[in-house]
Image (cartoon, rainbow, N blue to C red):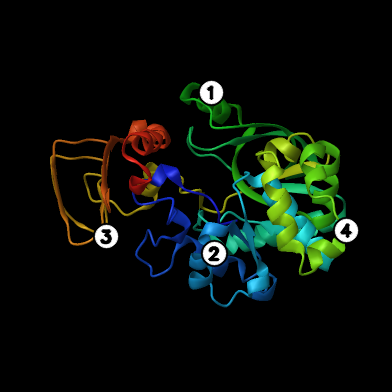
Amino acid sequence: MCGGAGTRFWPFSRESRPKQFIDFFGTGQTLLQLTAERVKAIVPEENIILLTNEAYAGMVREQLPSISQEHILLEPARRDTGPAILWAARHIAARHPDASFVTLPSDHVILKEARFHEVLRRGFEFVETDDRLLAIGVTPTTPNTAYSYIQKNDSFRGNPDISGIKTIAEKPGREMAEIFLKSGEFLWNAGIYMWKAKSVIKAFERHAPDISSVFEAEDSVFAGDSEMKFIADVFPKAGSLSVDYAVMEKADNAYVLESDIGWSDLSTWNALHELSPKNREGNVTQNCRSLLYDCRNCIVAAEGNKVVVADGLEDYIIADAGNALLICPIEAEQRIRNIVNDVRDRFGYDYI
């Protein structure tokens, strides 16, 4: 899935070039390219499908030119993960009725790749055995308020790391996140799901009929030349709903596999700060020159040849890209999405 706007990484992530298409770590590969490389150890390249907004078709083709055109599914509108995943399931099932697949966000970081591959192998074995929906959960280490959480239910047949799903909680406040962490019942929701295509379709029919009905058509529609025309007509009519709320927290055959894969969804500047090498004052400089006087735990990023000079800042974001400069306390980064809306309303779309 590579169609998100990545608003919270503004001003680097823009409507015209979201974060999944950016090389944040100076490795020569964007987050999208790293995701594709990571999964190739398990899924052959000819089986990789890219689901993105039609506005990003050119960047997807440019960054992953070896993926065939018929494996790039272009969403005509943004409708969250529910409709996107159901379309992918219909597309896959029409070609391979017994196929299983893993759904991966394209903008996450996974540091323990060998362990990640083990998790995928085990996950495929689990969902292919029966009619099961599987989320990958991550053992939490901090009361992070930028992540959603999955509450575990009873363990599955004595497997301590596989449990039923009791509930899913979106981005809690600090106090609630601390309660989640102390309880030992909650995992970070990695946004990675594994299932058989026909299991996904069945789950939407049962738990989200309003969305399922939008995609009702013969398999031949999803397997033929008329698929994109059909999607252009019906996709905008689907309600905007995440797969968590549409299916995962309702289904009695939904499970979560607890893992330790060195995961971060890289959703915020603070997440990038945590993952990046720091100097002895805890400062991070991303691909630019900086002079930081009496500054601690700051992250500085700037495009081009610019030199950034700051004095007396602690726990701040300084991000300069294109025609916009952001200076913001790290603790206030959850407001960046609202800031972007304010910039758009006051100064226009050229700045977002």
Distance of mark 1 from mark 2, alpha carbons?
39 Å
Distance of mark 4 from mark 2, alpha carbons?
26 Å
Residue 300: image location, x then y, percent: 25, 48
Residue 216: image location, x then y, percent: 84, 50
Q: Which residue is mark 4?
A: 218
Q: Which residue is mark 3?
A: 287
Q: Amino acid at mark 1?
A: Met
Q: Of circles 1 and 2, which is in front?
A: 2
Distance of mark 3 from mark 1, alpha carbons?
36 Å
Task: Give me the residue at 68% from left, 55% from top.
Answer: 232
Disc 1: CA contacts within 10 A as few (<14), some (14-19) or many (>=20): some
Residue 207 position by quadrant: top right
Horizontal side of 185 relative to 347 (left or right) equals: right
Distance of mark 1 from mark 4, alpha carbons?
45 Å
Query: Which numbered tag is attached to residue 57?
Result: 2
Query: Which numbered tag is attached to residue 176?
Result: 1
Disc 2: CA contacts within 10 A as few (<14), some (14-19) or many (>=20): some
Residue 98 in view of the camera: no
Mark 4 near mark 2, Cβ–Cβ under 8 Å?
Answer: no
Q: Secondary structure at mark 1?
A: helix
Q: Amino acid at mark 2?
A: Ala
Chain-order first, disc 2 or disc 3: 2
Residue 277: image location, x then y, percent: 31, 54
Chain-order first, disc 3 or disc 1: 1
Chain-order first, disc 4 or disc 2: 2
Distance of mark 3 from mark 4, alpha carbons?
50 Å
